[in-house]
């Protein structure tokens, strides 16, 4: 009975995982049921296995526990509050996803099926998004259930680097057919990302490609991909500038270059309405964090809208408040939002977690001849939310779930390789000692 129950819970965990990655970009309600199924399965078989394995947490697990504990303390310190435990629940979910996939026991075939379902869902989501956009249901190209265009673009960018990792992989034995399919999916995704017109996400893609070039430039596939990507981007940009002025596609592509002039980037130009709104929310976030009186634990997870803007003292007047907005949704920056909502402790724990992921990526960077898809997918899952989220979105919802899943799988693989290498080294030491 015990063994069969553990097997069924393993299967339930996998079904929940597959259902989750399939539903994230295209269906709203099923993702919540999928998370419950995954959680029941992942926790259930660990509790039922005999004997239960107790061990000392490693660095990642201590960091996860620190973030969870700070979020809980912030929630309790600010109780009652309007969002209730919604923010704490969201953080608990993404932290559990990372941990479960970090400690996963999946077979290689099961992980590959996870990849194919994830990529298929992204393709279906883009087709659905294009139809809704062209039908006038939505004003921008975005996924049906992965947030507004800014969050959808981050989700797509993370998925693109998963595809790119499979395309460049030299260690997993992917066939030529798989690489061709990934190349087609990647080009279609690049086209859609440009059409989305989100500058933060495009900047994040450029940053990641720059980091990959520094590490893997001698890889022929990378150079080919860089050339094709640059060519498509140039062609689409030129087409937009010579195309119909009132075309929605033309407007979105021109929006991407709105901060570029013949003298370079116009980083000090915030004349556009979106830029003024973003800058005002940055000011609200920074001022609340430094003046609000909640230095250690913040105002509570997802409680940014409770900020009383009129009670804050700004260095210069806001230009979009209250004419454009009256209640702040978030700080339009993942670090400022975390600082306001969970205080210095929450921000510190979050930065330490991201830094430790980055440290492991740098420490285990691949050679151009030995590339595993998880390294590139992890780089995308780390940098996309950091760069793009610095301009528009906190680390929440669908793209955060996807990011933490890929980070967990990637860091888990590095952990297993370290254990294997350590065991191999110890065996060598035992058998090489002179008798």
Image (tube, grey):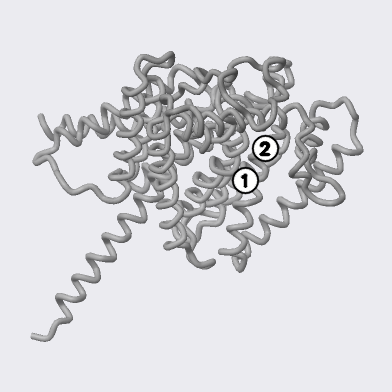
Q: Which element carries disc 2, helix, strand or loop?
A: helix
Residue 180: mark: none
How many numbered marks does the figure carry? 2
**Is 41 displayed left or right of 407 in the figure?**
left
Instruction: Determine the image quadrant of residue 101.
Output: top left
Task: Tell me the residue that label 2 is attached to.
Answer: 193
Residue 204: mark: 1
* Residue 58: percent from left, percent from top: 26, 50
* Residue 406: percent from left, percent from top: 44, 43
Please say whether residue 189 is visible from this viewpoint: yes
Q: Nearer the viewer, mark 2 or mark 1?
A: 1
Instruction: Determine the image quadrant of residue 40.
Output: top left
Kindly report the distance in space between the C-alpha atoms of the residues bearing marks 2 and 1.
12 Å
Closer to the chain start, of discs 2 and 1, is 2
Picture residue at 39% right of the left edge, 46% below the top: 409
Q: Which element carries disc 1, helix, strand or loop?
A: helix
Which residue lies most toward the bottom here?
434
**Is 31 displayed left or right of 325 in the figure?**
left
* Residue 169: percent from left, percent from top: 51, 57
Q: Residues within 10 Å of mark 1 (few under 14, many from 20)?
A: many
**Considering depth in this image, is 113 or 94 the residue closer to the camera?**
94
Picture residue at 58% right of the left edge, 58% below the top: 212
Q: Quadrant of the N terminus?
A: top left
């Amino acid at each position: 009975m015990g063994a069969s129950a553990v097997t069924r819970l393993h299967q339930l965990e996998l079904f929940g995982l597959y259902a989750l990655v399939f539903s994230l970009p295209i269906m709203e309600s099923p993702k919540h049921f999928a998370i419950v199924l995954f959680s029941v399965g992942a926790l259930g078989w660990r509790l039922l296995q005999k004997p239960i394995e107790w061990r000392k947490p490693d660095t990642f697990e201590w960091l996860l526990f620190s973030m969870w504990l700070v979020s809980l303390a912030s929630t309790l310190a600010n109780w009652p509050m309007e969002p209730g435990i919604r923010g704490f629940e969201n953080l608990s979910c993404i932290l559990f996803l990372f941990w479960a996939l970090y400690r996963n026991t999946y077979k290689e075939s099961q992980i590959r099926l996870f990849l194919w379902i994830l990529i298929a869902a992204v393709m279906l989501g883009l087709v659905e998004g294009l139809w809704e956009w062209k039908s006038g249901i939505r004003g921008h190209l975005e996924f049906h259930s992965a947030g507004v265009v800014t969050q959808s673009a981050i989700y797509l960018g993370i998925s693109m680097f998963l595809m790119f990792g499979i395309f460049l992989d030299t260690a997993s034995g992917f066939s030529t057919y798989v690489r061709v399919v990934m190349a087609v999916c990647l080009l279609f995704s690049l086209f859609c990302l440009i059409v989305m017109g989100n500058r933060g996400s495009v900047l994040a893609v450029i940053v990641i490609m720059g980091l990959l070039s520094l590490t893997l430039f001698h890889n022929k596939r990378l150079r080919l991909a860089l050339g094709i990507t640059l060519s498509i981007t140039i062609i689409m940009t030129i087409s937009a500038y010579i195309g119909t002025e009132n075309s929605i596609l033309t407007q979105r592509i021109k929006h991407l270059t709105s901060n570029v002039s013949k003298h370079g980037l116009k980083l000090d130009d915030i004349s556009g309405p979106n830029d003024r709104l973003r800058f005002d929310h940055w000011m609200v976030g920074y001022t609340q964090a430094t003046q609000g009186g909640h230095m250690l634990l913040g105002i509570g997870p997802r409680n940014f809208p409770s900020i009383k803007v009129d009670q804050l003292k700004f260095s210069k007047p806001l230009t979009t408040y209250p004419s454009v907005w009256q209640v702040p949704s978030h700080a339009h920056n993942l670090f400022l939002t975390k600082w306001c909502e969970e205080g210095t402790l929450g921000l510190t724990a979050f930065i330490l977690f991201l830094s430790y992921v980055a440290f492991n990526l740098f420490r285990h960077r691949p050679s151009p001849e030995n590339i595993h898809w998880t390294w590139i997918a992890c780089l995308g899952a780390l940098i996309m939310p950091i760069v793009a989220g610095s301009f528009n979105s906190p680390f929440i919802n669908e793209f955060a779930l996807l990011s933490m899943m890929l980070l967990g799988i990637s860091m888990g693989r590095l952990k297993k390789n370290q254990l294997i290498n350590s065991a191999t080294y110890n065996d060598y030491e035992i058998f090489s000692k002179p008798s």
